[in-house]
Image (tube, grey):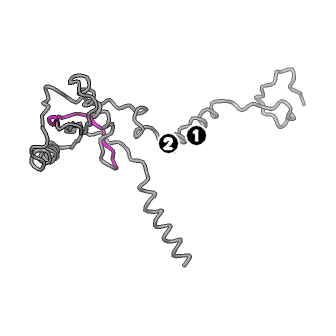
């Protein structure tokens, strides 16, 4: 009975631990984004056109857009500053092909235009009014790109080893002469002759 318990715990850990591994960001040559903007206190809904953005990062494990909140903030800032409509909920959806992005956009629009017909005033923001700009992602700004604690430990250890190699080891002048190395740091007057 105890063996069954230990085996089941081992299997559980074998399943959980690999999934906890950190995912690496993957550079995609291009992606297609569109935005959905709503304020749930009124009935006006906005959609942006599908826009092609070059050089975006996606998470290798979850397939999420890295720094997707930055793209949402671009929309939110546009509405707050240009249209004087603060406190909007902004959602950015993306796909790696235009066809997939169109499919996602049509699903959103169908929900608001057909299933809830007459409840919402659906408006379109074309590319001339609003355009997404590619987010410049730096390693230290985005936690997903920063080194993991394991990587940091390895780097620190490597730097320490390299530092120790460069510095000569100090000699102890209190050691007897036969134990001291010949290239001792002692002044010549203190070196004894045999």
The residue depicted at 71 percent of the width and 32 percent of the height is: 169
Is 184 within the magenta? no
Q: Residue at x 46, y 57 (%)?
A: 17
Main SS of the magenta segment?
strand
Q: 152 left or right of 99?
A: right
Q: Quadrant of residue 138?
A: top left
Report which quarter residue 180 is drawn in: top right
x and y percentages locating residue 103 in the rendered image: 14, 47
- Total tally of numbered discs in the picture: 2
Q: Which mark is residue 151?
A: 2
The answer to whether residue 38 is above or below residue 185 is: below
Q: Earlier in the sequence, mark 1 or mark 2?
A: 2
To which residue does mark 1 refer?
A: 157
Q: Which mark is residue 22?
A: none
Disc 1 crowd, CA 10 A, few/some/many (<14, 14-19, 20+): few
Query: In the image, what residue occupies the spot 14% across and 41% down?
Result: 120
For the record, the magenta segment spans 44-61
Q: In the image, is residue 51 part of the stretch drawn in magenta?
A: yes
Secondary structure beneath disc 1?
A: helix
């Amino acid at each position: 009975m105890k063996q069954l318990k230990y085996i089941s715990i081992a299997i559980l850990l074998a399943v959980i631990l690999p999934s906890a591994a950190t995912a690496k960001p993957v550079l995609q040559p291009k992606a297609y984004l569109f935005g959905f903007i709503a304020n749930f206190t009124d009935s006006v809904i906005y959609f942006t056109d599908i826009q092609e953005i070059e050089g975006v990062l996606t998470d290798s494990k979850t397939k999420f857009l890295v720094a997707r909140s930055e793209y949402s903030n671009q929309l939110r800032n546009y509405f707050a500053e240009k249209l004087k409509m603060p406190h909007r909920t902004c959602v950015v959806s993306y796909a790696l092909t235009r066809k997939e992005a169109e499919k996602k956009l049509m699903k959103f629009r169908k929900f608001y235009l057909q299933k809830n017909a007459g409840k919402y005033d659906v408006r379109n923001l074309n590319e001339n009014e609003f355009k997404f700009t590619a987010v410049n992602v730096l390693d230290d700004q985005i936690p997903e790109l920063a080194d993991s604690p394991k990587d940091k430990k390895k780097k620190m250890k490597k730097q320490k080893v390299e530092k120790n190699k460069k510095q000569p080891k100090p000699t102890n002048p209190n050691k007897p002469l036969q134990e001291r190395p010949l290239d001792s740091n002692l002044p010549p007057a203190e070196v004894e002759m045999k």
